[in-house]
Amino acid sequence: MYKNNLIGNNILGSNFSFDLKVIRGAGAYVCGDETSLINSIEGKRGISRIKPPLPINKGLYDKPTVVNNVETLCTCAEIMKYENDIFLEMGTSNSRGTKLVSVSGDIYESGVYEVEFGKNTINDIIKMCGGIIGKEIGMIIPGGIATECLIKEELNTLYTYEDLEKIGSSIGSGGMIIINNEKNIFEILKNVSDFFKNETCGTCFPCREGNKNINIILENTIKNNTISKEKIEIISEIKQAIGLASRCGFGQSSVNLILSILNKKVKNHEYQH
């Protein structure tokens, strides 16, 4: 693109100049937070910043900065490509256009699917991917491990922002994970907890210590193969503390999946797998 003068100085003979620089990240999950990402680009540790100031006022190298996901920019290009508003005609009034859904787990045809909002239920997407591997659905994680799980009774929910919000979950990153009913729930919980315990940047005390303590509870759960209602209540209280005190979305969403699995699959009473 530089060679063909599509990027750089005086693009195609105009007075408009634009440069692109690709910076390779270190793979920290917390850099999904825009201020942590800005710190990382500046060569600093990937931890969140206190807001305000917002990045749009004071961001990368203290300059006004807009942070977008690649999918957002690709969608902008699709919108601008056509003279008529094709994008606005797709989806619903609150969920416009399409979404790239990355489907993995106990599914026959995992991959990335482009789905029009409001045209398919969760169950339709599962069928689109060849159906589940195993006898029966255990649960669905609709948008990555920071989103609340769905159970089989919720599979007829339309894939839109608003419909998933109605049942207490969200589209999140679009990373949908299909899990059959043959998996050990406690092992899944511990695996998710391990991730959030290890990936927290440690800046906010409740996030750092809260996820560590939840991990200890779930480690004991695997050893004993059971969890009590009291332990679930403790995890719920820790989630509330983390959510109120964390300054970025990592902490605020770190216990979403864990608590939703406990509430929906364990049903608030002593449970044995």
Image: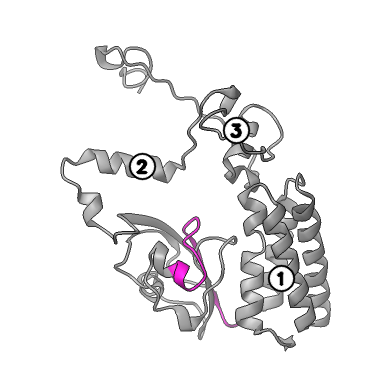
What residue is pinned by disc 2?
Answer: 74
Residue 197 visible in the current orientation: yes
Q: Is residue 263 left or right of residue 10?
A: right
Query: Of the residues shown, which amino acid type is indicated by label 2?
Result: Cys
Q: State the residue in front, 55 or 18.
A: 55
Q: Quadrant location of the N terminus?
A: top left
- Element class at badge 1: helix
Quick one: label 3, few (<14), some, or many (20+) residues within 10 Å?
few
Q: Amino acid at mark 3?
A: Pro
Boundaries of the magenta span: 164-182
The residue pinned by badge 1 equals 236
Q: Which residue sits furthest left?
A: 84
Which is nearer the N-term, disc 3 or disc 2? 3
Side of 271 relative to 89 (left or right): right
**C-alpha distance separating marks 3 and 2:** 28 Å
Residue closest to the eye, 194 or 50: 50
